[in-house]
Amino acid sequence: MSAPIDTVERKGLSPRQRAQRSRWIQYAILIALVLVAAFTADWAQIVSVFFKPQYIKAAFEDGLMQALVKTLEYTAGAFVIGLLGGTLLALMRLSSVGPYRWIATAYIEFFRGLPAIVVFIAFSLLPLAFEGLTIPLDPYGVVWLALGIVAAAYMAEVIRAGIQAVPKGQIEAARSLGMPFGLATRKIVLPQAFRIVLPPLTNDLILLVKDSSLVFIIGTSAEAYELTGFGRDLANTYANLTPLVTAGFCYLIITLPLGILVRRLEAKAARAR
Amino acid sequence: MALVEIKNLHKSFGTNHVLRGIDFTVEQREVVCVIGPSGSGKSTLLRCVNLLEVPEEGQVIVRGEDITDRDCHLDAARSQIGMVFQQFNLFPHLNVLANCTVAQTTVLKRGSAEAEKIARANLDRVGLNDKVLAYPMQLSGGQQQRVAIARALSMDPQLMLFDEPTSALDPELVGDVLTVMRKLALDGMTMLVVTHEMAFAREVADRVVFMDAGVIVEQGPPAEVIGNPQHNRTRNFLARVLNPTHVEPT
Ligand SMILES: Nc1ncnc2c1ncn2[C@@H]1O[C@H](COP(=O)(O)OP(=O)(O)O)[C@@H](O)[C@H]1O
Ligand SMILES: [Mg+2]
């Protein structure tokens, strides 16, 4: 094993110098690739397909902002349902009552294992399967329910971990002050648990922002389009990808700050430890 | 009538038979210190008194009411028994005042103004009226433990349980907490204290209980149990605790 090291060392390079040299080689390859791409690509074509200014303008005029607002509304409602449902499921999973645990476990495993798109297809078929079935608050009701049902399963596991991370002494202190279990959970355990899981919950929120794009599968009316449905529809109309790309950037406007927030929260939590 | 009467208490964790038939009483206004080696079941005994641990056998009778009985209103009974933990267990998401009011307003249904007044009076009692708006994290261990005492006192308990309240403290902070407890004893509070502070037990306790391996080996006035122990086990324990070169691990 020592032979290759000897040969390298004969050249008189320290490990640090070697690491530096390999880094420069990687930079050189990268720059070469970028240059090749820059000179061989048909930029005019790319711009006219993906970033055509007149279609960006058209996207704004046709209601990009309304679609952005819809995405935010769908996500926010689903997040609330996911949070409430997830908290309930987490408490059920930690319950001493067997059936609660079994139901919660079955629910969580089922909806975590299922692709979200399957749930959305199921919701799109519901009115066919159950004639006369109406979910209130159209179109919000269906969207919130479909997204929230899946989100609850993911968030339940995060929240359960948070509850378990609260020291046992906390519930003991609360109980010894005479607080019943439910009250102690609500006033003492859950506030601390949510503080602990704020970063991973924000990650779930980012996933939810993206999952809200699946809403187009349910087949909403044009006024109810969120960003993806809107972008796809307009891209079809103009036979140009620019509106879809524009909608895509709107997602980044939402998710990138949230991503930064997660990193801040994680750093803060690490410092507090 | 005794304030607390414990009869034939047995508690096991799996095959580990921790309490092996404990009988003793605490009278109104009495201060009882429980001493004994680590692992002898002192904490478990204390935790059985407010049913944080459920004993398999025996009774805990508080003011004539058997709290091990299934029909007993456990939460109401607990709200009358204050507990101070070795690790303080303050609520980190609430400030000092809220730590002292949260159970008052929710369990005793006191109005927030009344609860706050009582909390402030008790924080004054433990010498922390200037820390009302601080969060537990911002306080020293000694201050946190005194807030924990004020939190328990705010419920107007009949009995205070202390489980090694100074064992997690830096040596220079122990005195403040013991001073508060001494004052409490003088005010007539009934106290059951697990401690390794022999000087405190000697000075403040009306009675000292020595426990070993899940049984009470001997009990009596501190001058007798600490000053002139009758049993070998007590003598060995005291020799180890009182000899500074052999500090008992906690
Ligand atoms: N929750 C628990 N689960 C299992 N064993 C326990 C638990 N609490 C205490 N024990 C055991 O009971 C015995 C007595 O513990 P404890 O009452 O804490 O003693 P002490 O307070 O006198 O040091 C120890 O052997 C300990 O390991
Ligand atoms: Mg102990």
Image (spheres, rainbow, N blue to C red):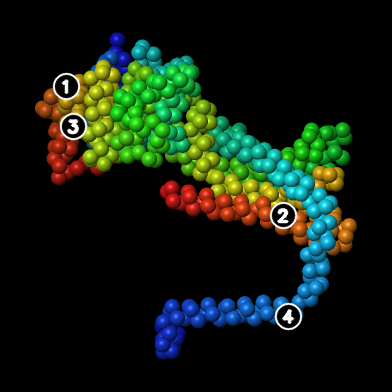
Residues indicated by labels 2 and 4 sit on the same polypeptide chain: yes
The residue depicted at 83 percent of the width and 34 percent of the height is A134
Q: In which quarter of the image is the C terminus of chain B?
A: top left
Q: Name the residue carrying label 2.
A: A250
As drawn, which residue projects farthest toward the left? B228
Name the residue type under label 4: Phe
Nearer to us: label 1 or label 3: 3
**Label 3 is found on which chain of the structure?**
B
CA–CA distance in space, label 3 to label 2: 69 Å
**Badge 4: how crowded within 10 Å, few (<14), some, or many (20+)?**
few
The residue depicted at 11 percent of the width and 28 percent of the height is B227
Name the residue type under label 3: Met
**Label 4 is found on which chain of the structure?**
A
Quarter occupied by residue A171: top left
Residues indicated by labels 3 and 4 sit on the same polypeptide chain: no
Taking the image as shown, residue B120 lies to the left or right of residue B242, namely right
Mark 1 vs mark 3: which is more N-terminal? 3
CA–CA distance in space, label 3 to label 4: 85 Å
Q: Name the residue carrying label 4.
A: A39
Quarter occupied by residue A57: bottom right
CA–CA distance in space, label 1 to label 2: 77 Å
Element marked by disc 3: helix
Mark 3 and mark 1 in contact (Cβ < 8 Å)?
no
Q: Which mark identifies residue B198?
A: 3
Please provide percent x and percent y for residue A245.
Answer: 76, 60
Q: In which quarter of the image is the N terminus of chain B?
A: top left
Q: Name the residue carrying label 1.
A: B221
**Badge 2: how crowded within 10 Å, few (<14), some, or many (20+)?**
some
Residues indicated by labels 1 and 4 sit on the same polypeptide chain: no
Name the residue type under label 2: Cys
Mark 4 and mark 3 in contact (Cβ < 8 Å)?
no
Please provide percent x and percent y for residue A113.
Answer: 67, 49
